[in-house]
Amino acid sequence: MSMEPQLVKSAERTVRILEALAESHNNLTLSELQQRTGFPRSSLHALMRTLVELNWVETDSGRSAFGIGPHALLTGTAYLDKDPALPFAQETLEDLRAEIGQTAHFARRDGAHVLYLATRESREADHVIPRVGRRLPAHVTALGQVLLAQLTDDEVVALLPDPLPGMTDHTITDLNKLTGELDQVRTRGWAYEREQGTPGLACVAVAVDYRIPATDAISCAMPARLGPAETEQITEAVIKHTRKLAATLRREGIR
């Protein structure tokens, strides 16, 4: 009995370390990891040594900085490989991109974030950020907003921080304003954001209705400069292809 809390603590610390490394664009020093995680330096030393030996973390010869290692990729790929909805979603993204020529995403809500599971890039891909395996705050993306709209306002308030972190000048950072936007999403059945997550980009998203509440969504990213007529055409295409995907997943019995 006395060892169980220590085992749980070690497991939690390992996961938090890997998450911190995954979220950082650069390798982190031990001091930076300690600052981000709040873990004691002695515990970090031992955990980092083990993670490096197991190839979950990479480091330089002097062990001055650390980054995600190759075995983390194996686990992430295994998650994608076992998801029965993903092959159907990838086909939908291909069809959607073929019809409208813009970047299409398939993502799943992960608490207060969205996790990108598949992407098909636009034919003009110079402005696209590769996103498969990446996580973004749900409130800054159309994908996240359409999935948050599946929840009640009380559930959203309990889930998200207040104030909300901003990513651009257009990000909704007020929780009351966000719940108002989510009400509009519920009414019209799709979400739209313009430069809330990425400058120069707008996005429309529709939930994939094969689970209740929906956990997944399809989106299309487009240049923010597009006019109302083009945006409406893209929105209609996303609705059409997402409804078709949901019907296919229900027919296949995928849950």
Image (cartoon, rainbow, N blue to C red):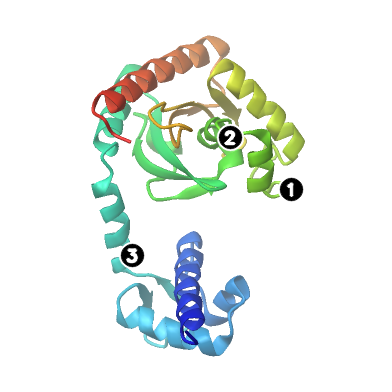
* Above-or-below relation of 188 to 172: above
Tell me if residue 85 can be seen: yes
Of labels 3 and 1, earlier in sequence is 3
Tag count: 3
Using a 10 Å C-alpha cutoff, classify the residue at mark 1 as few (fewer than 14 neighbours), some (14 to 19) or many (20 or more).
Answer: few
Secondary structure state at the residue bearing disc 1: loop
What residue sits right under mark 3 in the picture? Answer: 72
Residue type at mark 1?
A: Asp
Q: Which residue is mark 1?
A: 162
Left or right, 225 with respect to 118, comes to: right
Q: Residue at x 38, y 19 (%)?
A: 243
> What is the spatial separation of the Cα atoms under label 2 and label 1, in whole angstroms?
17 Å
Above or below 18: residue 203: above
Q: CA distance from mark 3 to mark 2?
A: 31 Å
**Mark 2 neighbour density, 10 Å: few (under 14) some (14–19) many (20 or more):** some
Q: Position of residue 221 (x, y in %)?
A: 47, 30
Out of 62 and 240, give the one closest to the viewer.
240
Q: Image quadrant of residue 252? A: top left
Q: Amino acid at mark 3?
A: Ala
User: Circle 2 sits on which residue?
Assistant: 151
Q: Is residue 39 above or below residue 204?
A: below
Extreme residue in the top direction: 229
Would residue 178 be found to the left or right of residue 82 on screen? right
Q: Which mark is residue 250?
A: none
Position of the C terminus by quadrant:
top left
